[in-house]
Image (cartoon, helix red, strand yellow):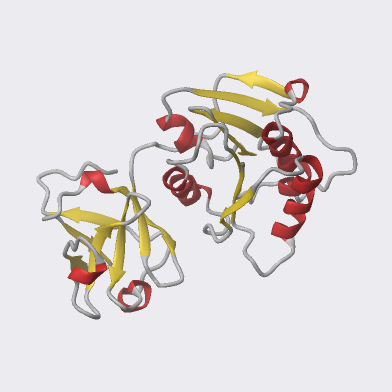
Amino acid sequence: MLVLFTDYGWHDPYVGQVKVALAGLAPGVAVIDLLHAAPDFNAHAGAHLLAALCRDLPVGAVVLAVIDPGVGGPREAVVVEVDGRFFVGPDNGLLSVLAGRARVARIWRIDWRPENGSESFHGRDLFAPIAAWIAAGKVPSEKLASIESLQVQFDTAELPRILYIDHYGNAWSGIRGGLAEPGTNIEVKGNVLPWRRVFAEAEKGEAFWHVNSSGLIEIAVNRGSAAEKLGLRVGDPVRLSGLPENPLH
């Protein structure tokens, strides 16, 4: 299984070009589009979002993860094995939360570069071939060098900010749901929001928070857009209120 996580969007040719490269090198391997609307250029938000979305992937899955504003620069290209799952992408922090939270993690630098590959499209010309070979059972060990750690490592603690807004206007935070009790209030943009277990328990138009299906605290409005109602954007801070101490930083 090959899983794609990028900030490429759906309106440009980039996702299709990556899939063409994957199909040529790993024919017959299922390719799953996990997300192509990750926050543009934002590896920090992407790292926490990727960790949440990939928590239930089967062992052996290969994830091609690309949010790469530094493509063509000095940042390294890496493969990270996280508890039996492989992640291929840039060493810019995007894979660091997964690696830091893993029970077992192994890391390799990609030393290979394709002939005539694009300097600005490593997703297609560098990461895709490596991911395809791994998914096809042909780990290219001669193209990889084992390293001790990633160059860029984000804090693996919760990220108390909005990191993604879906098309309904639901705002996902970087806080895992286990940190907040149901009676806790969430504060965002000066609004103190109550907990509701599910949308059906909120009044129509009511803003609230709940733990979404990916295990993250989400700001929502029943049959409405939390982003519009509360003026939310990616990067806005989120605070747990009603607790004796805030465990986040």
- Count the labels in the image: 0
Q: Residue at x 69, y 20 (%)?
A: 145
Nearer to the camera, 147 or 19: 19
Nearer to the camera, 124 or 29: 29
Q: Residue at x 76, y 39 (%)?
A: 129
Horizontally, residue 215 falls left or right of residue 42, namely left
218, above or below 1, in the image: below
Q: Residue furthest right?
A: 116
105, above or below 8, in the image: above
Horizontally, residue 207 falls left or right of residue 19, namely left
Q: Quadrant of the N terminus?
A: top right
- Residue 198 on image: x %, y %: 24, 64
Horizontally, residue 57 falls left or right of residue 228, namely right
Q: Quadrant of the C terminus?
A: top left
Q: Is residue 86 visible?
A: yes
178, above or below 148, in the image: below
- Residue 244 on image: x %, y %: 9, 45
Q: Residue at x 20, y 53 (%)?
A: 240
- Residue 203 on image: x %, y %: 18, 77
- Residue 189 on image: x %, y %: 28, 67
Horizontally, residue 126 falls left or right of residue 205, namely right
Q: Is residue 119 visible?
A: no
Q: Image quarter for residue 220?
A: bottom left
Q: Image quarter for residue 157?
A: top left
Q: Residue at x 46, y 36 (%)?
A: 98
Nearer to the camera, 217 or 34: 34
